[in-house]
Image (tube, rainbow, N blue to C red):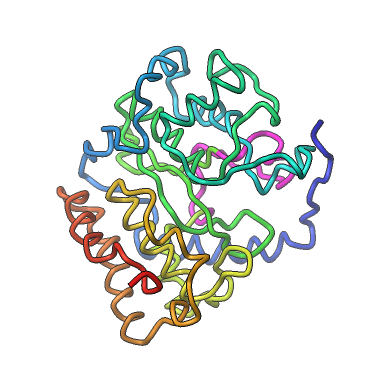
Amino acid sequence: MLKSTKMTRSCLAPEMTIRLSIATVFQAMIGGRMTTSITPGPYARQDALTDPGVLAALYDDLPVGPSALREVVSQLITHVDWAARYGIPPNTAMPRDTQPIADRLKLIQSIHAGSLSAQRPPHKRTFGTCRDYSLMICSMLRHRSIPARVRCGFATYFPWRPYEDHWICEYWSSEETRWVRADAQLDQFQRDQLALKFDCADLPRGAFLSAGQAWLLARSGAAPTSDFGHGNAKGLWFLRVNLNRDLLSLSNQQMSAWDTWRDATVAGKTVSDAEAAEDDQLADAIETAESTADMVEQFRELAERRQVPPWRG
């Protein structure tokens, strides 16, 4: 049974409006429409994590459109941080490690066999985090030859902090020649709890910032670095973590050593002026690469030099 713990946001609404406006204006300044004249074909192919493997046939009876697929995915996974709100007992085993889609599909079938579009109550779903939802919808879209990619960054629609660490999926709209952002985590329960009214399959400008956009926003002084984070982890060093995770994800490496940020030492949480300046250039390079014919190759070249975080060096 879902617990009715709806979050009242009347007192937060003005703050959220302000930060959404800041993010919206900033995205517009740096090309926030994510438009390009390049057809991003390489993102239409599955990679090691998104490949459904032997269970690819489970996708055959699913709806075609991104919006309907987003709804399906939202009911296949229960976010571990939302489990209590769904009424799931705290002693329930809830693994949060990211899984390859082929393995998750097997787990889904072991818990509740049948069509992926079947209604599954929260306790009959697999457990995961925002990245798992994003990988799943990315996999489904690619199965239909719709270019899609997983992005790491910060969302502005969660009340826990102004810019919350988050992962979403982008898919290519050939009609609008732009990347469209979708959040597959938000089922109806979460949308009601958060009082969200926008289309979760086409996030409005400013609702989500890629890590590169967030880095540039913070470095411009328009938002304090302490507004960006995850739990107790926040500040410029965490922005740097997500900047590198997003770069690697753009090269279809959605998991990396940067995911071990919880193991970072005090020294690993320090960003020197020289490192910050280098990351300024990286954030600019990511934005610039978006409009090039060989964007994926450029992302891979940049990613080669960003495999190892400082606490692993």
Please tell me whether residue 57 is drawn above or below residue 194 in the rendered image. Answer: above
Q: Nearer the viewer, residue 171 or 307?
A: 307
**Principal secondary structure, stretch drawn in magenta:** loop
Left or right, 139 with respect to 205, comes to left
Please tell me whether residue 270 is drawn above or below residue 114 in the rendered image. Answer: below
Image location (x, y in percent) of residue 258: 40, 62
Image location (x, y in percent) of residue 184: 53, 37
Kindly indicate the quadrant of the structure image that contains residue 147: top left
Q: Residue at x 29, y 60 (%)?
A: 287
Magenta stretch, residue numbers: 185-207
Image location (x, y in percent) of residue 167: 48, 50
Left or right, 35 with respect to 82, comes to left
Q: Please count the marks in the image.
A: 0
Kindly indicate the quadrant of the structure image that contains residue 52: top left
Q: Point out the image quarter for the C terminus.
A: bottom left
Please tell me whether residue 246 is drawn above or below residue 305 in the rendered image. Answer: above
Q: Nearer the viewer, residue 49 or 180?
A: 49
Q: Residue at x 66, y 44 (%)?
A: 196
Kindly indicate the quadrant of the structure image that contains residue 162: bottom right
Q: Residue at x 35, y 42 (%)?
A: 149
Q: Point out the image quarter for the N terminus.
A: top right
Is residue 189 inside the magenta stretch?
A: yes
Image location (x, y in percent) of residue 131: 49, 45
Is residue 168 inside the magenta stretch?
A: no
Left or right, 79 with respect to 14, comes to left
Taking the view exactly as shown, the residue that stands out farthest to the bottom is 273
